[in-house]
Amino acid sequence: MAHVNSRVQKYRDALRMAGLRPVQIWVPDTRRPGFAEECRRQSRLVVQVDMADKDMRQFMDEALADVDGWTE
């Protein structure tokens, strides 16, 4: 086990020397029961709100039309 710990520490030290730092990020557990249904529920709510807001729909359509050529 000491060999593995030493190797991991060496790798982390190399990353730090390259200007990186470790960061812990907490994300939703996609394996949790009910996760997919909660995603569907929230998606339905977003669609309902988007469909009811004509100004936002127009703004989004205009924004999408303005991205042509960004990757060229």
Image (cartoon, rainbow, N blue to C red):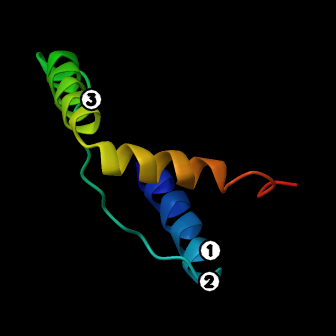
Mark 3 or 1: the one toward you: 3
Q: What whole-number distance in Å separates the C-alpha atoms at marks 2 and 3?
A: 46 Å
Q: Residue at x 21, y 36 (%)?
A: 52
Q: Are marks 1 and 2 in contact (CB under 8 Å)?
A: yes
Q: Percent position (x, y) of residue 59?
A: 44, 54
Furthest toward the right, the residue is 72
* Secondary structure of the residue carrying numbered label 2: helix
Above-or-below relation of 39 to 21:
above
Q: Where is the C terminus found, in terms of image quarters?
A: bottom right
Name the image quarter holding residue 66. bottom right
Q: Amino acid at mark 3?
A: Val
Q: Residue at x 55, y 79 (%)?
A: 16
Q: Residue at x 15, y 22 (%)?
A: 41
Q: Percent position (x, y) of residue 43?
A: 25, 27
| Callout 1 crowding tier (Cα within 10 Å): few <14, some 14–19, many ≥20 | few
Asked if one can make out residue 32 in the rendered structure from this viewpoint, the answer is no
Q: Percent position (x, y) of residue 31?
A: 23, 21
| Callout 3 crowding tier (Cα within 10 Å): few <14, some 14–19, many ≥20 | few
Compare residues 33 and 59 and report the one nearer the observer.
Answer: 59
Name the image quarter holding residue 5. bottom left
Residue that numbered label 3 is attached to: 47
Residue that numbered label 2 is attached to: 17
Q: Residue at x 26, y 27 (%)?
A: 30
